[in-house]
Image (spheres, rainbow, N blue to C red):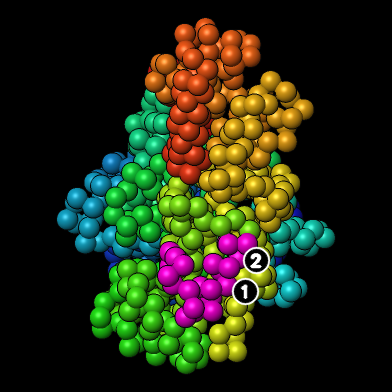
Amino acid sequence: MDMDTVGCMTSLGHTVRELRRRSFTGRADEIAVFRNALGAPGVLFVHGAGGVGKSALLDVFADIATEKGFDPVRVDARHLTLGQTALPAPAADAPAVLLIDTYELLEPLDDWIREHYLPSLPASCLVVIAGRQGPGPRWRADPAWRELTQVIALGNLSSQDGLAYLTAQDVPGDVHDRLLKISRGHPLTLSMMVDAVRRGAAPRALSDLPGGVGALLTHLLGEVPSTRHRTALDVCALLLVTTEDLLRSMAGGDAGALFAWLRTQPFIEESPYGLYPHDVVRDAITADLRWRDPARYAELYRRKLAVFHDQVRATTSERERLDLAVLTVVLNGTRSPHTALASLPPTMQAYADGLHDGDRSSIVAMTAQWQGREQAELVAYWMERRPDAFRVFRTKTGEPHGYGARLDLTEADLGVDPGADAMWAYASKYGPPRAGEQVRAWRFFLDRDHGQRPSPSLTLFVAWQILDILLIGDDTAWSFVGAFDDGELWTSSMESLDFWAADEAGYTVGGSRFPVFAHDWRRTGIAKYTELLHACQMGVPTRPSAQVLDEAVLSQPEFTDAVRSALRTLHTPELLRSNPLLQSRMVRQHGRVERTPADTLRDLLDEAVGTLKPELRVLLDRTFLRPAGVQERVADSLHLSFNTYRRHRDKAITQLTEELWRRETRPRPSTPAHDADAPKPDHAGSTDPTV
C-alpha cells in the first residue's frame, strides 16, 4: 500500500470522525461523569438498549481522553476472537483509558475479566465498559468493585437534546415534534426518521417504514433465541405490563423460563405490576407485527383487552385499579391520533382520593377562579348533597390540586343544576331510565393550576372514566360526560370511545357553554363496546356512535306487549321480523353471527320457558313454542277446562315476561371474554401472542 493511499484513508477517517462529532448532541451529565473520572483508576459501566447511542458516547469519551493527554484504547467485542488473549493491555508507562464496547458479547468471560484481566491493568487506567446489560450481581456483591464502579444507565435523548439533533441535521422545523414523538428520543430511531425525511418521506408512525422497523428491531433486540422468545416479546409489547401468570395464559408452558429471560433484557423495565418494554421497543415490535401479520395482531389485540379487563377486576383496591388505568391511558394516549388523549401527561405520583372536609374551600375557590361564581355555587351544592361522588386529585404530599365529580342522577335532583337537568332531559327523550337503572353524569373537572389543560389531574380524571367503563354495572343506562368546556378538542376523542356529541344535552353555566357526550349502555353493552374498540384499533369502519339511537329501548309495558306479540307470531316470520324485541338489549347481547335476531329471540324464549315450573313450561311449549293445535285442543290435552287453561296460560305468560324483563334489565355479566376458539396454553397447545 503506497503512502498516498494511507494518506487518503487517514483523511477519510478524520472526515468521518468530524461528521460524527458534529451530529452528536446531549449526554452532558454522562460526559461530566467521564471527565471527573479521568486520571483515577476505576470502571464506568455504561448500559442501555440497542441503538441508544453507547458507541457514539464512547467516541466522544475517546476524543476527550485524547484532548486531556490520555491514550485511549478502543475495543469492540464484535471484532474480537473470543478468548482470554483477545483483550489488549494498555501501556503501563502512560495514563490510559480503555474503552470496551458491545460488552454483552463478552459475558462468557465476565468472571475472568473482573477477577483477572482488569486487576492486571496499570493502576492509573480508567476502564469504560459499554453493553446492553448493566453489571451483574457479582460486580455489586464485591465490595472492591462496588467502590470502584460507577454505573451509567443510558436512556433516550431529552426533548431539548432531540431538537438540537434535528436542528443540527437541518431537518425542517415543522416536522420536529412529529419525529420526536415517533422516535421518543431514541437516537437510532431518530436518525432513521431523519434519513427518511431526507429521502422525501413524511413518516407519521414507525409503521410507515416497514423496512425501517425491521432494521430497527435488529438493533434493538439483537439475536432472539427462538420463536418462543419472540412470542414472549410480542406479548410484552402488547400487554400493559407482563407478569409470569399473564405470560403463561398467553404463551403457555415454559412461561417461567421466558419470563426470566425477559427480565434480563436491557430494554425491559420492572414495575410493581410487572415487566414492560421501553417505549420505542414496544412501538417497533407492535408496528412490525401489525405489518407482518395483521390477522395475528388483530387476534392478540382482542385477547389483550380481555387480559386487561381481568387484571382490573382482579384488583380490589380502587387506588391500584386507578393506577392500572392511568398506565394504559398514558401508554395508549401517546400513540393516539386524538389531540386530547395524546396530550395526557404522566401523573408524577399524583393520586385520587375521597373528599375531605378541608378540601371544600379550595375546590370552591379554584372553580370560581376558572369557571365563575355560578359554577362554584353548584360545586358547593353537590359536595354537600353527594360528597361520595367527588374525587380529589392530590400531589404526592396530599395537597389537593384538582377534582372531578361523577353523579348518579335521579328525578329528585332536578331543578337546581342546569347541567344535571339537561342530561336528564336528554336521557328521558331518547331512552328513559327504567326501574332500577342509573343515569351517570360526569359533571365537574378542574385542575387548580391548569384548569382543563393537560395536567396530572386531567390524566387521573380520564383514567377514572375509563375505569368506570371497564366496571360498568348492568344497572347503568346512560353515561354522560359533561365536564369539559372545549367541545372541539374532545369530540374526536370521545367519539373514538363511542360517546357521541349529544348537542341537546349541552348546557350553559355562568356564560360558559359545556358540551355533553353520551353513551347508552342498554343499546351498546360492554361486550359490543369492546368489539367496537377492537374494530377501531384495527382500522375497521364502525357505525356512527349516535346511530344507536335508532334502536329501541322498551319500557316495561312496551316490553310486556312485545313478549305477548312474539308468542303469537313466533311461527309467522314476516310478522315476527317487526317485533320490537328483536332490537332489545337481551337479543343484541345474546346474538351470534350465524343466528338471525329472530332465531336468537326464539332461543331466549325457549330458554326462559325452561325456567318455569313443569306444568307452566308444558303449557307454554304446547301453546306457543311447539303448538299442538288450537288452544282448546291444548286445554283438552292437559285435561284442563278452557277457563282453567286460560288462567294458567296467563300466569305462565306473566312469569315468562318477568324472567325476560329481568334478563333485559339485568343481563348476564358481560366482560370482554377470551375467544373460545383461541388456542389454549401449552398443556392444550401453545400460542404465539401479542397483547
Residue located at (55% from left, 45% from top): 557
Contact (Cβ within 8 Å) of mark 1 with mark 2: yes
How dense is the environment of label 1, judged by Cα within 10 Å: few (below 14), some, or many (20 and up)? some
Residue furthest to the right = 200
Label 2 belongs to which residue? 502
- Assign a secondary structure to mark 2: loop
Identify the image quadrant of residue 34: bottom left
Say if residue 18 shows up in the picture. Answer: no
Q: Which residues are magenta?
A: 407-429
Q: Residue 9: give x, y in percent of width and height.
A: 70, 57
Most common SS among magenta residues? helix
Q: Is residue 628 above or below residue 39?
A: above
Q: Amino acid at mark 2?
A: Ala
Q: Amino acid at mark 1?
A: Gly
| Front position in the image: 227 or 598 | 598
| Front position in the image: 4 or 233 | 233
Residue located at (63% from left, 58% from top): 430
Residue located at (36% from left, 41% from top): 243
**Residue 398 is a magenta residue:** no
- Assign a secondary structure to mark 1: loop
Label 1 belongs to which residue? 506
Q: Specify whether 492 is left or right of 433.
A: right
Say if residue 324 shows up in the picture. Answer: yes
Q: Is residue 181 above or below residue 450?
A: above
Residue located at (63% from left, 30% from top): 566
Q: Residue 585: give x, y in percent of width and height.
A: 57, 41
Number of numbered discs on residues: 2
**Residue 414 is a magenta residue:** yes
